[in-house]
Amino acid sequence: MTDQTPDRPTLFSRPLPIVIFVVLAVVLDQIIKIVVDHTLPLQEAVHVIPMLALYRTYNLGVAFSMLSGMDGWFIVGMRLIIVAFVIWLWHRTGKQRTFAHLGYALIISGALGNLIDRFLYGHVIDYVLFYTETWSFAVFNLADSFITIGAACVILDELIQPKSANT
């Protein structure tokens, strides 16, 4: 008898759990954006704690206002391609790779959350601002956080995976 157990599929390597997670994450993102859009003043900081404010603004670009000068349909197409590519990666990734599958679920959730904004409003609603007296980070939202944390999970998964002898 050995202590080794066969590689079991991770939760997010199966379609139903990842779909449920993505739907819940997108719904949460959309609810928060609706509340922000109806309650926060436009482009006026509401200070929460030192260095953190709620600041409603409209982003015409992608995450963290990148590509804000690009055509809206180009950005929609790019997001759709990214979602399709991440789904393809998810499908090809080994079922035991926990962090990669979690990362893919987060990236898909964030991309879809911002894509819905683009379709509904023509822009993305951003509302989190980190700042100091002389510097501020780009205003972002929960969907942007999902994308960033998801990418970090994928990178972490690559770093902690045992390397095969054939590489």
Image: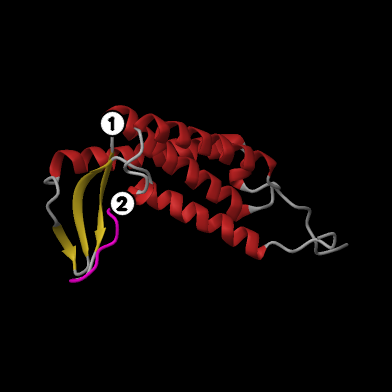
Find out whether residue 134 is within the magenta segment: yes
Vertical comparison of 14 with 56: above or below? above
Mark 2 residue crowding within 10 angstroms, few (<14) / some (14–19) / many (20+):
many
Residue range of the region highlighted in magenta in the rendering: 133-140
In the displayed orientation, state which residue is furthest to the right.
Answer: 1
Q: Position of residue 150 (x, y in %)?
A: 50, 52
Query: Could you tell me which residue is drawn at 64 percent across and 64 percent down?
Result: 159
Residue type indicated by callout 1:
Gly
Viewer-side residue, 62 vs 155: 62
Label 1: how many Cα within 10 Å (few below 14, some 14–19, many 20+): some
Of the numbered discs 2 and 1, the one sitting upstream in the chain is 1
In what element is the residue under mark 1?
loop
Q: Is residue 136 above or below residue 84?
A: below
- Where is 83 relative to 132, above or below? above
In-image side of 103 versus 50 (left or right): right
Residue 156 placement: quadrant: bottom right
In the picture of the structure, the residue carrying the numbered disc 1 is: 122
Discs 2, 1 touching: Cβ within 8 Å: no
Give residue 72's position: percent from left, percent from top.
35, 32
Residue at the spot x=38%, y=38% of the render?
Answer: 113
Element under disc 2: loop
- Left/right placement of residue 165 relative to residue 24 reads right
Which label number is shown at residue 140?
2
Which residue sits at x=43%, y=49%?
Answer: 146
| Residue at image point 46% right, 36% down | 79
In the rendered structure, which amino acid carries the disc numbered 2?
Phe
Q: CA distance from mark 2 to mark 1?
A: 16 Å
| Secondary structure character of the magenta stretch overall | loop
Residue 25 shown in magenta: no
Q: Position of residue 82 (x, y in %)?
A: 52, 39
Q: Which tag is nearer the camera, tag 2 or tag 1?
A: 1
Residue 151: x and y, percent?
Answer: 51, 54
